Image (cartoon, coloured by chain):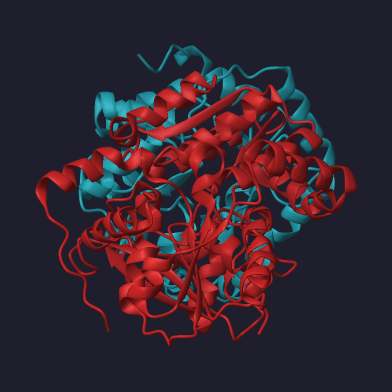
Chain colours: A cyan, B red
Amino acid sequence: MKTNRLQQLFADKNEPVLAVYFMAGYPQRDDTLPLLQNLEAAGADLVEIGIPFSDPLADGPVIQACGQCALENGMTLVLLFEQLRDMRSSVTIPVVLMGYINPVLQFGVERFCEACRNAGVDGVILPDLPPDEFEMTYKPVFDQYGIAIILLITPQTSPERIRKIDTCSSGFVYAVSASATTGATQAFGEAQVAYFQRLQKMKLNNPVLAGFGIHNHAGFAAAAQYVNGAITGSAFLRHVTENGTDAPGITHFIKTIKQPEYDYPVTS
Amino acid sequence: MNYQVTEDGYYGTFGGAFIPEMLYPNVAELRLQYRAIMEEPEFKKAFHNLLRNYVGRPTPLTEARHLSAKYGARIFLKREDLNHTGAHKINNTIGQVLLAQRLGKTRIIAETGAGQHGVATATVCALAGLPCIVYMGEADIKRQAPNVARMRMLGATVVPVTSGSRTLKDATNEAIRDWISNPETTHYIIGSVVGPHPYPDMVARFQSVISEEIKTQLLEQTGSAFPDYVIACVGGGSNAAGAFYHFINHHEVKLVAVEAAGKGIHSGYSAAATVLGKPGVIHGSKTLLMQTADGQITEPHSISAGLDYPGIGPLHAHLFETGRAIFLSATDDEALEAAQLLAQTEGIIPALESAHALAALEQLCFKPDDVVVLNLSGRGDKDMDTYIKHLNENEPAAATVC
């Protein structure tokens, strides 16, 4: 099972896990693999690679703009798998792809799962593929190729449905921190704390990573008190947009999220 | 063959609810309650009272004597153009605003392309005293200034959408993003038979009043409730869904859906989703949609903003796939000519959308005793700029008869 890299990460890790999201083909078309390598070197524990899509309805302005730019750069899913073909000769951390269902449907679900396995991609996050549709149609193919499916829960998800989503997920569960699209910057407040405490008490089968609105050490540390770690996406893309893709800059960014002494406003 | 939606929200292989988890509670609430609420006597009473005394229903069924003579059949026009706000769109917005109130929602959002659905939503929100936010592509705001002014006069907030191609599909994305961010207070009034289950079925049911009335009126005027043809234009397909609804299981009634071919189906400027589209997921449902080999949704073109959508509702994708409906298309120019013909022979200026349905009369061969009902979905006031430009440029060409 290719989920081993994900399982291993959460089994071995005593500290909170930091997952970083970036967009394939951004800022330049061929930045995908170098960015992935730089993130591993900088200390990211897990990477989510965004598949650009013309109509990203769960994303806020930052990821929308980066996806648009990637598409203009000529990025496609076919090209992404070419870029990732030899990924495992230089990258050891778990890698998951995150995108929307339509490009996957056009690529072919089975062909997609096979390409993930061949490239060493460990899991997939498709926010517009809900657990109900996944179980009804796609689960056998994902299982056949050993590709983890990471499903989302939100503060409005009922306890029964959280159990269902936990059962259906593999790798980890993605806890959206608030009712919002990606990149929202509301404070990590009481509502979030109550929500994560609730999740912590439920003792889910899967590890839980918090995402949406995690943009500094305070958010990361607050989430990590209750769940296994957090995902930062829009904040990292802002960093890349402003400072480029070079290794020292990325190392610095990772430290600002992971370590309190580096806690200064990342964004302008 | 079953043409009704299944429990899972499917029409054949099309439909479903491909939504991010953030929308699940809202969509599940609707799915679990819409049928029961729509069946409540009080709801029905309020809905039909507003349709009758506010919208002006039933709309007439007008026998079009000149068109009948020209095309060699008995042609009737279902006059949705005579509804309050000028199109069929208000049948759905009346229903959904009552539903939203029944669910305790305090804020309404909507998307709009040409502005007809936006105006119909702003109208019912004014009536219900609910705040109304309408998302509209920046490109469409420029093209449809009078409707933007109408929405504002009705008290709605019109939010310009600057993402993507700045048209209807982007306005829909932005409305969905708003809904994700305001799940508890807000109801999203989708304007067509698109979106996640139960929207396609819910909107079709609210629009089904069109075919319900056609049956009664046709019986009075011809002695039979069932015509030989029902013709309607299709963008997302709400007027067609309403006009077809009570005839779908009567196979002797031929259903004709007319898509916008734009500048020609293979010109690169078209919105004929059944010809150019492949199965895919747009705005929460699996349907036929125009897209690249990489699965990126492409920008359609039609002179009519109401048909300028890259997909069609899943019900229509199913009617297409099963062959239950005949799908035709009309170009921008054919629609313009058909609009002129109707204006000059019947004294009715149709919406550009409805003009596509009229243009399809040229492509069908009727028997003299065929009874044809064409759904005239809206009036042409909003399209006068386009019509004036066309009048100044061209004389109408002689139409060919089959």
Q: How many marks?
A: 0
**Residue at image point 63% right, 53% down:** B203
- Residue A174 visible: no
Depth check: give the residue in front, B298 or A25.
Answer: B298
Q: Residue furthest right?
A: B41
Query: Above or below — where is B371 with respect to A255?
Result: below
Residue A8 in the image, given as x and y percentages of width and height: 60, 54
**Residue at image point 62% right, 63% down:** B16
Residue B20 in the image, given as x and y percentages of width and height: 59, 47
If the image is split into quadrants, where does the C terminus of chain A sit? Answer: top left
Dividing the picture into quadrants, the one containing residue A28 is top left
Depth check: give the residue in front, A179 or B282.
Answer: B282
In the rendered structure, the answer to whether residue B15 lies left or right of residue B370 reads right
Residue A125 in the image, given as x and y percentages of width and height: 53, 53
If the image is split into quadrants, where does the N terminus of chain A sit? Answer: bottom right
Query: Above or below — where is B339 with respect to A257?
Result: below
Depth check: give the residue in front, A107 or A259.
Answer: A107
Query: Above or below — where is B286 with respect to A97?
Result: below
Query: Above or below — where is A263 with respect to B64?
Result: above
Dividing the picture into quadrants, the one containing residue A138 is bottom right
Residue A129 in the image, given as x and y percentages of width and height: 58, 57
Q: Residue furthest left?
A: B393
**Residue at image point 43% right, 46% down:** B379
**Residue at image point 36% right, 28% down:** B146
- Residue B256 visible: yes
